[in-house]
């Protein structure tokens, strides 16, 4: 480098109120921890769970509810949205809302209605012999959901989401067919296959974490279901667990029809999202067992066709399906031990 070339280390800071810096994001997280410790609700007497379990439930619900709401925080509406339901009926969703579960809100699992729903001595929706273990498992599910929400807040708040730039062939659709393959090859080799863009690379941290945790959440939901229905959790694959649950509920006499109907919805969603050729399985398994599916801008392979932001959109779709499945399994649990007519379909 020439000695006469001046290096300018000063960069002009551009203020963007909609994007948090790394320091601001970490500071917001620190403030949340302090404030939420003060904002805990009083413990409720007369429940089937101990005070320590109540306290843990209150803490995770409070944290989930406050993400994106603190002063200077990246607002929830800018990085998340309410569930788009595909299979769960409007009637079931309305029933959840009336029961205190905010199924149509952006953070649908941030509620303390679970205390009265599952731990009340008047309801007995969960067998009292396993009620503490149930809440221990369920709180872990809520923690995973909270961590995914935090990762989504960071990804969007740090400005890592970028709209896709059209490829050369998309920008010039009238290129003669005989030249398309040659031009695309030259474009890929000359640019995309030889680059590592920092924002794409950094975005992969949150993308890969969310994908892995979404897949882990499915295992937790199946384990939680086995606990509720009194089944051994000796399955080697999640599909074995789903099969055991399906066989048990299908042969159980006197079961509320709503339980079977809504478990069928849960099972359909699980089988679709976890299928061999589904995006979640291919993406997550390649991260753990293979090289991993690189995105454009992060030293991609020739088979790479999506940017990190486009893969992020696919992850958000998986998270949406997961949350619908979680809502559905809550309805299943409520129907399972219902002893009155309040839970008609």
Image: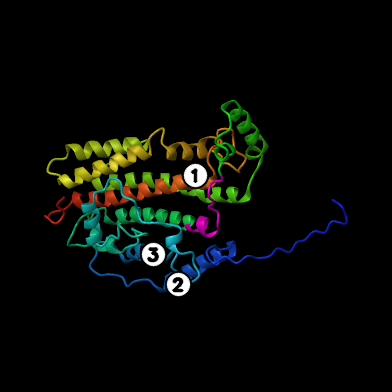
Total labels drawn: 3
Of badges 2 and 3, nearer the viewer stands 3
Q: Residue at horizontal 31%, vertical 58%?
A: 104
Crowdedness near tag 1: few (<14), some (14–19) or many (≥20) residues, C-alpha within 10 Å? many
Q: Which residues are magenta?
A: 153-165
Q: Is residue 219 above or below residue 79?
A: above
Q: Is residue 158 magenta?
A: yes
Precedes in sequence: disc 2 or disc 1: 2
Q: Which residue is mark 1?
A: 311
The answer for how far apart the CA atoms under marks 2 and 3 are is 12 Å
Q: Is residue 232 visible?
A: no
Q: Is residue 224 above or below residue 146?
A: above
Residue 202 position within the rendered picture, expressed as x and y whole percent measured from the top left: 58, 51
Q: In the structure shown, which secondary structural element does the residue marked by tag 1 occupy? A: helix
Q: Does residue 324 appear to the left or right of 254 in the view shown?
A: right
The colour scheme used here is rainbow
Residue 200 position within the rendered picture, expressed as x and y whole percent measured from the top left: 58, 48
> How would you classify the magenta stretch by its main secondary structure?
loop
Q: Which residue is mark 3?
A: 65
Precedes in sequence: disc 2 or disc 3: 2
């Amino acid at each position: 480098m020439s000695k006469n070339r001046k290096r300018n280390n000063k960069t002009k800071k551009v203020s963007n109120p909609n994007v948090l810096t790394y320091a601001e994001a970490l500071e917001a997280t620190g403030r949340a921890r302090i404030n939420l410790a003060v904002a805990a609700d009083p413990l409720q007497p007369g429940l089937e769970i101990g005070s320590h379990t109540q306290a843990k439930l209150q803490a995770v619900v409070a944290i989930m509810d406050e993400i994106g709401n603190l002063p200077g925080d990246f607002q929830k509406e800018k990085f998340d949205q309410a569930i788009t339901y595909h299979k769960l009926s409007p009637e079931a969703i309305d029933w959840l809302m009336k029961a205190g579960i905010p199924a149509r809100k952006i953070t649908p699992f941030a509620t303390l209605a679970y205390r009265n729903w599952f731990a009340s001595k008047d309801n007995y929706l969960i067998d009292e012999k396993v009620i503490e273990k149930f809440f221990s498992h369920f709180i872990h599910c809520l923690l995973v959901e909270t961590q995914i929400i935090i990762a989504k807040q960071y990804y969007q708040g740090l400005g890592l989401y970028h709209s896709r730039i059209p490829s050369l062939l998309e920008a010039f659709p009238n290129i003669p067919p005989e030249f398309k393959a040659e031009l695309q090859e030259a474009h890929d080799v000359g640019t995309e296959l030889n680059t590592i863009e920092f924002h794409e690379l950094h975005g992969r941290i949150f993308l890969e974490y969310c994908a892995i945790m979404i897949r882990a959440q499915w295992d937790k939901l199946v384990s939680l279901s086995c606990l509720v229905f009194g089944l051994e959790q000796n399955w080697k694959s999640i599909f074995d667990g789903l099969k055991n649950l399906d066989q048990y509920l299908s042969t159980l006499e006197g079961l509320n029809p709503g339980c079977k109907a809504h478990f069928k919805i849960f099972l359909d969603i699980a089988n679709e999202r976890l299928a061999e050729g589904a995006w979640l399985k291919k993406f997550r398994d390649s991260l753990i067992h293979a090289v991993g599916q690189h995105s454009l801008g992060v030293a991609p392979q020739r088979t790479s066709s999506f940017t990190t932001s486009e893969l992020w959109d696919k992850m958000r779709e998986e998270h949406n399906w997961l949350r619908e499945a979680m809502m559905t399994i809550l309805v299943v649990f409520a129907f399972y031990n219902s002893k009155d007519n309040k839970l008609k379909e």
